[in-house]
Image (cartoon, rainbow, N blue to C red):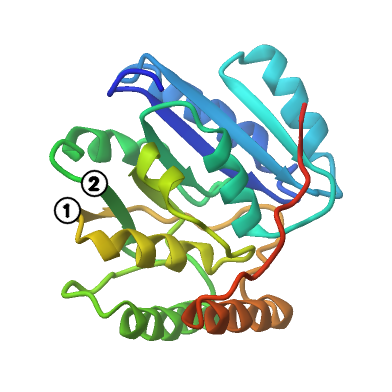
Amino acid sequence: MQNSQSLSIILPVYNEGQNIKEVVEKIIAGIKNYINTFELIIVNDGSTDKSADIIRSLSVQYPVLRLINIQKNKGYGAAIRTGINNAQMQWLLIMDADGQYEINDLNYFWARKSGYDFIIGYRKKRSDSLYRRLLGKLGNLIANLFLKTGAFIKDIDCGFKLFKTKDLKMIPLLASGAIISLEILYKLLQNKPLFIQLPVIHYKRVAGRATGGRLKTIKQNILEFLKLILNKPVYEHPLNSPI
């Protein structure tokens, strides 16, 4: 592990070839002014577009970038777990790679992290369709009922969260889909950590397609949620190969 001011950024990628170059360039340009030691871990989760080729090319230009390639799509949760397992810095930022979040919001998180175990972002205003917003509100309400914490988590699925890397490495994570966001918080909250929730700006997706609202994805999330309740394993570890 590196010094206490070091950061690993995990970007799970699935068919984000139209977005990933701009996202990477903004991240590196945005954080180098206040974080000296960082790594950008991009987990390509079986993309069928040009994502892997673009990321591989970017890794030549930016040595801080590490590509981990999963040959067959395993799911958002599997990509997140792979990133956690490979993270080497003291702090860890989980950030979506679709261009709907800006790395500039990390500046505020970074300045506030002292004394807290993690920071959860919440979208001040979601730039999604009405269907996605309603689905998100329902899922968030159900998830909070399951968490049974004294504080209401405003946006469990927000793709912008800051953790201590060692804390995530110490908990067994099982989900392969988006339920990983709930699983992480559920298992961390067992130890009554100190955390805060901070607002982030959510931008409209300009390219690519979101998969969170698809019927197949919803079914997977329901199944994994039930298995999380029953504390049963939900997948086998994916085979992945660093490139």
Q: Residue 114's quadrant in the figure?
A: top left
In the shown orientation, is residue 53 left or right of residue 138? right
Is residue 85 placed above or below 131 in the rendered structure? above
Q: Nearer the viewer, residue 234 or 195?
A: 234
Q: Secondary structure at mark 2?
A: loop
Residue at image x 56%, y 26%?
A: 25
Q: Secondary structure at mark 1?
A: loop
Horizontal and vertical percent position of residue 241 = 78, 35
Q: Find disc 2 in the rendering and name its residue.
A: 117
Marks 2 and 1: CB-CB under 8 Å? yes
Residue at image x 77%, y 26%?
A: 243
Is residue 203 placed above or below 43 in the rendered structure? below
In the shown orientation, is residue 130 left or right of residue 168? right
Q: Find disc 1 in the rendering and name its residue.
A: 194
Q: Residue 34's quadrant in the figure?
A: top left
Is residue 159 placed above or below 154 in the rendered structure? above
Q: Nearer the viewer, residue 80 or 112?
A: 80
Residue at image x 42%, y 26%?
A: 89
Identify which amino acid the numbered label 2 is placed on.
Answer: Asp
Q: Quadrant of the N terminus?
A: top left
Horizontal and vertical percent position of residue 27 = 48, 30
In the shown orientation, is residue 188 left or right of residue 172? left
